[in-house]
Image (cartoon, grey):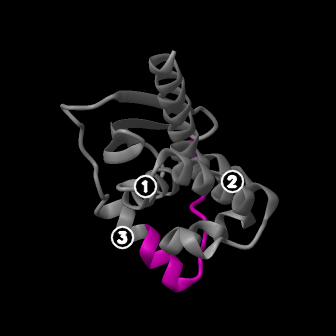
Amino acid sequence: MAIPEPQFDELYRELIIDHYRKPRNRSELADRDYRLEGLNPTCGDEIQLDLRFDGDVIADVAFGGAGCSISQASASMMTAFLRGKTAAEAAEASQWFEAMLVKGDPPNPALGDIEALQGVTRFPVRVKCAMLGWKVLNDGLERHEQATTESEK
Ligand code: ZN
């Protein structure tokens, strides 16, 4: 699929390329609570996400997959952000990220480096690429919430 790579401001471009070439947390968790998978057929991106919770805190996270630089860099940035966050904090960050990319809201400062992906809004076809990892995370948070609610019954 020949979708041209978006052009970003230099600083952000370097950050994105850095995460693409040297992805953080790109592995699998042998000891995991959930494994989620997601696909962005528009671009052919795939993300696999492993999550381990300690109570309500994301104790460990790893991702795998294949696809364009935006999808993989976005997932890498997301995993770097997630470790040590509570499920509620992760869900909140996911909403900020979606608001930034889909509604065009200014980035929430708490997202840190992730704001580099704001430039993706100028390339609507790539928004789904950037969103993929977070979509997969949302599935994981939902499963965690269901499991937590079940165990409280
Ligand atoms: Zn893509």
Q: Residue at x 34, y 43 (%)?
A: 63
Quadrant of residue 118 within the rendered picture: bottom right
Relative image position of residue 33 (x, y in whole percent)? 33, 28
Cα gap from disc 1 to disc 2, whole angstroms: 18 Å
Q: Residue at x 59, y 82 (%)?
A: 9
Give the farthest residue toward the front.
153
Q: Residues within 10 Å of mark 1 (few under 14, many from 20)?
A: some
Magenta highlight on residue 54: no
Is 71 situated above or below 44?
Answer: below
From the top left corner, tell me how far across and down residue 41 is, in percent: 60, 32
Q: Secondary structure at mark 3?
A: helix
Question: Is residue 116 at least partly visible in the picture?
Answer: no
Q: Amino acid at mark 1?
A: Lys
User: Is residue 28 shown above or below 120?
Assistant: above
**SS class of the residue under badge 1?**
loop
- As shown in the figure, which amino acid type bears the numbered disc 3? Asp
Residue occupied by mark 2: 98
Q: Residue furthest bottom?
A: 10
The mark that comes first in sequence, 1 or 2, is: 1
Residue at 37 percent across and 60 percent down: it is 80
Q: Which is more foreground, mark 3 or mark 2?
A: 2
Q: Which residues are magenta?
A: 1-16
Percent across and percent down for residue 110 are 56, 71
In depth, the one of 40 and 152 nearer the eye is 152
The numbered dot on residue 85 is 1
